[in-house]
Image (cartoon, grey):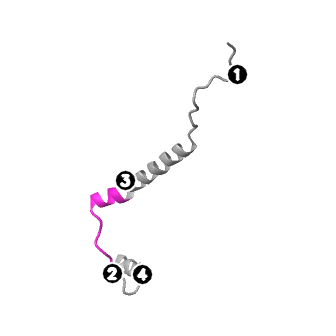
Amino acid sequence: MISHLLHSIAQEDGSLPGPGLSALETVVTYILVPIGIFLVIAILSWVITSPRRRKSRDSVITHIN
């Protein structure tokens, strides 16, 4: 009886719970999607901040023939 009262207290008036998620939907929603978002952000930040490769030119200052 107490569990029924606690459950009814947490519900708003007129709210009906929707269908539950399957195990696959739960894994995709709470594990794979956040990992994918993290990887996209990490790759973008790596590409943006990676040092640029300079063309190999012999400088007069650092190279003596």
Of badges 4 and 1, the one in the foreground is: 1
Sooner in the amino-acid sequence: mark 1 or mark 3: 3
Q: In the image, what residue type sits under mark 3?
A: Leu
Which residue, given by chain and number where applicable, does mark 1 sit on?
A: 60
First-in-chain label (2 vs 4): 4
Distance of label 4 from label 1 (alpha carbons)? 80 Å
Residue type at numbered disc 1: Val
Amino acid at circle 4: Ile
Between discs 2 and 1, the one toward the N terminus: 2
Residue farthest toward the top in the current orientation of the protein: 65
Residue sitting at the far right: 61
Specify the segment rendered in magenta: 17-29
Circle 3 Cα neighbour tier, 10 Å, few/some/many (<14 / 14–19 / ≥20):
few
User: What residue is pinned by disc 3?
Assistant: 32
Upstream in sequence: badge 3 or badge 2: 2
Residue corresponding to mark 4: 9
The x, y position of residue 43, in whole percent, is 48, 46
